[in-house]
Each structure stands twice: as structure tokens, then as C-alpha cells.
């Protein structure tokens, strides 16, 4: 049913443009597709034909664009159930998985505790989890060929290589090849925050934006940037690191070796460290810190306020440099949003420059399913030639 196991779905530029636009913003009429892609209507019709024949696209019933307006048009839409994608998030103590449809809609999820956080332990467990996900509905096994993996650290997506992850303690792991062998699927590996940004840019709040940023808050402060419609990689693999923008040169030391980075002030550990020192309670937990702040404790409230301020200033710096249309702020630390959201917004508004301040901030929590969905979004990208999966098994499924 698939052209081949690992081949991208589209190859010609016209097909690529039509499919990409319909995935994110469909249904759209052929006229609208032509206008948006710059193709002729004939070229759009020709590009859509094989995708309709393959069941990826279908025509909606005819609709008139306006009363009395010419002949009715049949908008084109993506058939979300035509193919499914598995997304996997590897954390230090859990594997999270999700099956998503063509438009990154989550269809089912599953998780497994990770007893030992080593690549050797992850591969068989990933195979088990993928098996469980594929067994959830008969149609999943027939129509799934791509796995996208979201993982903390420095990832070379094209090579399928995890270069280094401080959180997992891994270095130079050929993760895509290992997981392709273990699962039989075509595998793409991406940094977790970048994967989340892909999901948000293609299928979430970033749809249709050329300049977009996502910031995650929690144990670390992660971020990724979309510039000119593309995820920014940077010449050396580092770009848009909000977490390591300096907001106070005399501030606390950061794990990166510098001082006063946003992360050194606003990560959950940083908040806790500051509060333990200020309150003289060395065994205070983060949950207790949140409870204290919510109860009105001025020292605890000040620690969260400082964190929110650092995040807001960091985001303003990023916005002043790049000028995104929208920034999404999300993360595990989001449970405590009520404690710093106001400070993030206030500091952002105070430091955003001129028209750049028109960029809106959306703050919201980040359940683990979203990380797995990020993996699936990266897998969906493998349908396009420029994002072809980095590792496949020779035999195919
Ligand atoms: Zn730092």
C-alpha cells in the first residue's frame, strides 16, 4: 500500500507544497491552494491527483464560496487516518509513546517505566511499547511505518545520532539505527524541545507563521526558533537558547559554567535553591515551595517572582532579536504558572522593543503526551524529501 517502506510520500515541489499546506491548514479549495503556493490551478490539480488516488487527500462535497458566486468548488482535505505515526519521548525514567494521525491528532498513548537509563535498555523497551501502541487498533499496524523520537540533548537529526545528553548521560548513540532495528519502523530522532516546536509550528499555535518560538520551563529552560518558516539549527547546532541568555551577570552560577543565565534563576532547581537559602529550610521540596508561595509566604513568592521576571526578560531579548509573531511558553513547571505568569508577562512587556512587542505570549501546561506528539510530528515530516527519515531497516515491514 505504501510506495516503499522509507521513501518520502511526495517528491515533486508542487506535490510537496500542496501536501504541506493541506496538512497544516486544510481543507482548502484548489483556487486557494494555487494562490497560497504560487502554482497554477492546473499544477495544483496535477499535484493533488496522485495523493487523492493514494487516499491521502479527498474532496469535500461542493460548496459555493458565496451566494451567486460561479460554480461550486470542492475543497481538498487530508484524510487523517490514511497513515499513522508513532511518537516516542525518552526521559530519564520513563518512555512515553503516542500514535498520531496525519494531522498529529493523538489517537492512543502508552508509557513504560525505564528501570535503567541506557541505550541498550531503551531499545527493547521501545520495541515493546511500539508493539502495544500498534496493537491498540488493527488499522495502526497496517498503516504505520514511521517512528519519531524526541529526546533531551544535542541531536544530529540527519545522521540519526544523539551526540550528547547531559540529562540521560549518553554520548554518541546511533539512536535512529538502534530503534529502527528494534521496531522495524523508519526512525527520525530529534531534540525534544525542537520536536515540540515542530508540532506546534505545523499543527498548533504556530500554524502559518514564518517567525515563531517555543520556550519550555521546568527542570531546564528549553527553546527553539522558527525563522523564515524553518526550524533554526545554527551553524554549530546551537541557536535561540533562551535558557542561557544572561539576564543578571552577577546572578547565580549556571550549569553551563556562566552566571545569571535565565535557567540559573528560573529552573525548578534554581527556584528551590534560592528559596532554601533564603528561608533557611534546606530540605524544602518544590511542591512545598509552591504551597508556601500560594499560601502567601513573601520569601517564596519573591523566588517565583524573580524566576518569572528572568523568563520574561529572556523572552523579550529573543523577541527583540528575531521578531516572532507568537511565542508559546509551556513546560512541566507550568503547574506553578499562577505564581509566575504575571511576572513573565510584566517583564516581557517592559523589555520588548517597539513593534516586536506585538508578538503574543501564550502560557500553558505541557502534559507528557505533548512530548510524544512532538516525536510523531517529526515522523510526519519524514513524508517530505527534505526531512526523510534518518534510519530505516533494509527489509521493511
Ligand atoms: Zn547557562
Image (cartoon, rainbow, N blue to C red):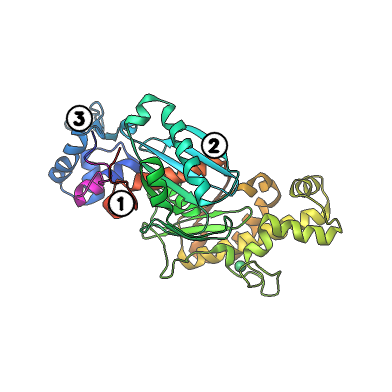
Question: What is the span of residues highlighted in magenta in the rendered image?
Answer: 4-18
**Structural crowding at the residue carrying mark 2, measured as other residues with C-alpha within 10 Å and reported as few (<14), some (14–19) or many (≥20):** some
Where's residue 222, x and y in %? 55, 57
Label annotation for residue 72: 3
Residue 174 colored magenta?
no
The percent coordinates of residue 190 (x first, y second) are: 44, 53
Left or right relative to 96: residue 275: right
Give the residue drawn at x 21%, y 37%. 51
Q: Tell us which disc is closer to us: 2 or 1.
A: 2
Badge 2 element: strand
Tell which of 186 and 270 is nearer to you: 186
**Mark 3, secondary structure of its residue:** loop
Specify the quarter for ligand 1.
bottom right
**Distance between the alpha carbons at the discs numbered 3 and 1:** 37 Å
Tell me, for residue 111, which label it has, or none.
2
In the picture, measured across the screen, residue 245 lies left or right of residue 206, that is right
Amino acid at each position: 500500500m505504501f510506495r516503499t517502506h522509507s521513501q518520502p510520500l511526495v517528491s515533486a515541489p508542487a506535490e510537496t507544497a500542496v501536501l504541506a499546506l493541506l496538512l497544516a491548514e486544510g481543507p482548502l479549495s484548489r483556487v486557494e491552494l494555487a494562490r497560497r503556493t504560487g502554482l497554477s490551478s492546473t499544477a495544483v490539480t496535477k499535484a493533488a491527483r496522485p495523493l487523492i488516488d493514494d487516499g491521502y487527500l479527498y474532496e469535500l462535497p461542493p460548496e459555493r464560496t458565496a451566494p451567486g458566486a460561479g460554480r461550486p468548488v470542492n475543497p481538498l482535505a487530508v484524510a487523517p487516518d490514511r497513515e499513522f505515526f508513532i511518537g516516542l519521548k525518552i526521559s530519564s525514567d520513563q518512555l512515553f509513546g503516542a500514535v498520531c494521525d496525519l494531522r498529529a491528532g493523538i489517537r492512543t498513548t502508552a508509557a513504560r517505566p525505564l528501570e535503567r537509563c541506557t541505550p541498550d535498555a531503551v531499545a527493547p523497551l521501545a520495541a515493546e511499547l511500539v508493539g502495544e501502541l500498534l496493537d491498540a487498533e488493527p488499522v495502526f499496524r497496517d498503516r504505520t511505518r514511521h517512528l519519531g523520537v524526541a529526546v533531551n540533548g544535542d541531536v544530529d537529526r540527519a545522521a540519526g545520532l544523539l551526540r550528547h545528553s547531559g540529562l540521560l548521560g549518553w554520548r554518541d548513540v546511533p539512536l535512529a539505527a538502534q530503534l529502527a532495528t528494534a521496531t522495524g519502523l523508519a526512525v527520525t530522532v530529534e531534540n525534544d524541545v525542537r520536536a515540540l516546536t515542530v508540532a506546534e509550528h505545523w499543527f498548533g499555535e504556530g500554524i502559518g507563521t514564518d517567525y515563531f518560538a517555543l520556550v519550555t520551563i521546568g527542570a531546564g529552560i528549553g527553546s527553539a526558533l522558527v525563522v523564515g518558516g524553518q526550524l533554526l539549527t545554527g551553524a554549530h547546532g546551537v541557536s535561540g537558547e533562551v535558557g542561557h541568555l544572561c539576564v543578571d551577570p552577577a546572578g547565580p552560577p549556571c550549569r553551563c559554567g556562566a552566571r545569571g543565565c535565565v535557567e540559573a534563576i528560573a529552573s525548578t532547581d534554581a527556584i528551590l535553591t534560592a528559596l532554601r537559602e533564603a528561608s533557611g529550610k534546606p530540605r524544602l521540596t518544590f511542591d512545598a515551595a509552591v504551597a508556601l508561595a500560594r499560601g502567601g509566604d513573601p520569601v517564596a513568592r519573591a523566588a517565583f517572582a524573580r524566576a518569572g521576571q528572568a523568563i520574561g526578560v529572556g523572552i523579550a531579548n529573543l523577541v527583540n532579536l528575531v521578531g516572532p509573531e507568537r511565542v508559546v511558553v509551556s513546560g512541566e513547571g507550568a503547574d506553578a504558572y499562577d505564581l509566575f505568569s504575571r511576572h513573565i508577562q510584566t517583564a516581557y512587556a517592559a523589555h520588548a522593543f517597539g513593534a516586536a512587542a506585538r508578538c503574543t505570549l501564550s502560557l500553558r501546561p505541557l502534559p507528557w503526551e505533548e512530548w510524544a506528539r512532538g516525536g510523531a510530528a517529526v515522523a510526519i515530516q519524514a513524508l517530505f524529501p527534505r526531512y526523510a527519515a534518518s534510519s530505516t531497516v533494509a527489509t521493511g515491514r
